[in-house]
Image (tube, helix red, strand yellow):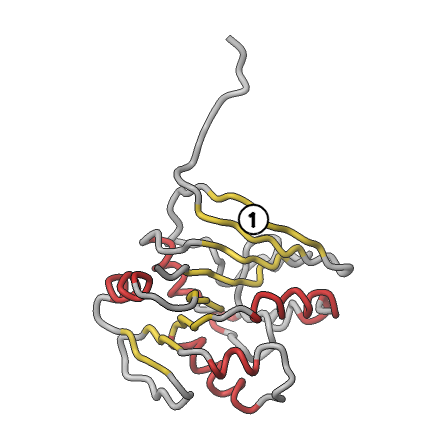
Amino acid sequence: MRKLVVLSFLSLDGVMQAPGGPEEDTSGGFEYGGWTVPHSDRASGSMMGEQLAMPFDLLLGRRTYELFAAYWPNQDADAIATGPFNRATKYVVSNSSPQLGWETSVLLSGDVVAEIRRLKDQDGPMLQVHGSGELVQTLLRADLVDELWLKIFPVTLGSGRRLFGDGTIPAGFTLLSSATTPLGVIFASYERSGEVRTGSFATS
């Protein structure tokens, strides 16, 4: 059984769109691309390196795949993600016919939820999901996410694509670990842990 982990950069108001640069994703008129960059430091790089050091395959939506495929094969081999991303098998979710020129890329189409369940049932390394906002909504709706590895930045953006959008179902999570960088980025990892529990502070 393979674990499926969603890794996401988030603003305080839950936006995940275009964390890495101004031209990354301007859809919907988004104007704040690259909002994570001023908060990046050695500590955040080290913690991200730990998350990418373990064996994993990638599960990506078409848009994120195309961004990554145009970028990572051409980066310095010493960059944190270059080796792990280039070595990983990339499972690409799309109902179109994208060009899969990045090494070890596999197209998933048709009944995507069934295909991903099949992948999870196989032996192999964890499946890491980066970016891929529309795919993440599908995964959340189908309750296929085992863990959330979030990087929460001290900024609000007001608009933009959010991690917890229309696909979110009520679900309980347990905090596995947390740490804070000197620039105020919170690294928090959560594990899926059953249903939402409720209670009351009212006294009888």
Residue drawn at x 28%, y 61% is: 117
- Mark 1 sits on what residue? 176
The kind of residue on which mark 1 rests is Leu
Residue drawn at x 48%, y 44% is: 173
How many marks on residues? 1
Q: Is residue 183 left or right of residue 68?
A: right
Residue placed furthest toward the right: 182
* Depth check, front residue: 158 or 193: 193
Q: Is residue 41 left or right of residue 160?
A: right
Residue drawn at x 69%, y 56% is: 154
Q: Is residue 82 left or right of residue 195?
A: right
Query: Please, is residue 189 above or below residue 198 in the view?
Result: below
Residue placed furthest toward the front: 123
Where's residue 167, x and y in %?
A: 37, 54
Q: Quadrant of residue 65?
A: bottom left
Q: Quadrant of residue 1?
A: bottom left
Where's residue 127, x and y in %?
A: 42, 66
